Amino acid sequence: MVYLDTDIFVQIPLDPIGLKSSLMVYALKTDDGWIMVDTGPESTSKTLLAGLMSYGVEPAKVFLTHVHLDHAGGAGSVHMAWSNVKFLVHPRGAPHLVNPSKLWSASSEVLGWLAHIFGVPTGVPEESVVKVSDGVKVAEGLKAIHTPGHASHHMSLFAEDMSILFPGSSIGMFMPVGNTSVYIPALTYPLKLDLYLESLEKQANLEPQVVAMPHYGVHDAGEVFSTARSQLDEWIKTARKAVEKGSTTPEKMLANMIEESESVRKAWEYSMRYDPLMEKIMIVIAKGLHEHLSNS
């Protein structure tokens, strides 16, 4: 882990019920005031607001990497606390920020009862939403980077002067276990693997010094990109081998991957021990990989 000056950089851990050390929200002090990166889910909004107030942080802007429940579900509560806050989001995500009903419906369909761990999101006024695109400067020294793959509307934020990258879910997840981390790629269904890999390299080419991961913590950038590249490659190769051997379903492919790959096995053991939501996520990852590899 890397620790930064709390006078200008704040990190607030949010633990939705049943999920331990799974989510971190960040705030960065700029000449334009405090800018927060994501809000976390609605279910942890009280923890978020209390944490911000304890540091004396009154956000002027909220940069949303994407509008999934665990990253933007608390936007409505943040707006209730600070009505002048502007929410910066990719144009494709903006309608779901204003009216999250379709997002909630789709999330509930994929996650089932686990969606309620994150809570039902409420919308923010359209006039509070600012649409941002690739390369836009959202504050002095802060640039928005379009990083699709995990989601078509996914954006990362690069603090050029401080050399800090806020990648949202575009690189993957580094879940803490003791003094180490378990890597899990943030692949989705339907899988857009080419976009995911392009976004990974696009961010590596920015050459940040540190990466502030929402899942989870601040890490040395070199270690993050090295791990993400090597272990994602291992996941893909193991999945391809399972399909070539005749794994006819995502479940059978995943079982084979767990048996053959140390990286996949550690991720599965993490999900079994610490995080019931991650089990569902790994099944979604398997579904995406299986369809992609079966059709390629």
Image: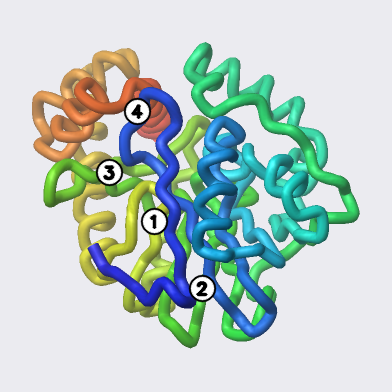
Q: Circle 4 sits in a helix, a strand or a loop, which is it?
A: helix
- Labelled disc at residue 213: 1
Question: Which colour assignment does the render follow?
Answer: rainbow
What is the distance, in whole Å, between disc 4 and disc 2 at their CAs? 27 Å
Q: To which residue does mark 4 refer?
A: 278
83 sits left or right of 173 in the view: right
Measured along the vertical axis of the image, is residue 115 above or below residue 64?
above
What is the distance, in whole Å, between disc 4 and disc 3 at their CAs? 10 Å
Q: Circle 2 sits in a helix, a strand or a loop, which is it?
A: strand
Labels 1 and 3: the sequence-earlier one: 3
Q: Quadrant of residue 264?
A: top left
Dots 4, 3 in contact, CB < 8 A? yes
Dots 1, 2 in contact, CB < 8 A? no
What is the distance, in whole Å, between disc 1 and disc 3 at their CAs? 10 Å
Rate crowding at label 4 as few (under 14), some (14 to 19) or many (20 or more) other CA atoms within 10 Å.
Answer: some
Labels 2 and 3: the sequence-earlier one: 2
Labels 4 and 2: the sequence-earlier one: 2
Q: Circle 1 sits in a helix, a strand or a loop, which is it?
A: strand
What is the distance, in whole Å, between disc 2 and disc 3 at their CAs? 22 Å
Front-most of residues 167 and 197: 167
Rate crowding at label 3 as few (under 14), some (14 to 19) or many (20 or more) other CA atoms within 10 Å.
Answer: many
29 sits left or right of 62 in the view: left
Residue 158: x percent and y percent?
Answer: 51, 73
Front-most of residues 28 and 143: 28
Figure quadrant of the C terminus: top left
Q: To which residue does mark 2 refer?
A: 158
Rate crowding at label 2 as few (under 14), some (14 to 19) or many (20 or more) other CA atoms within 10 Å.
Answer: many
Whether residue 291 is visible, yes or no, is no
What is the distance, in whole Å, between disc 1 and disc 4 at their CAs? 16 Å
Residue plotted at (46% across, 76% down): 7
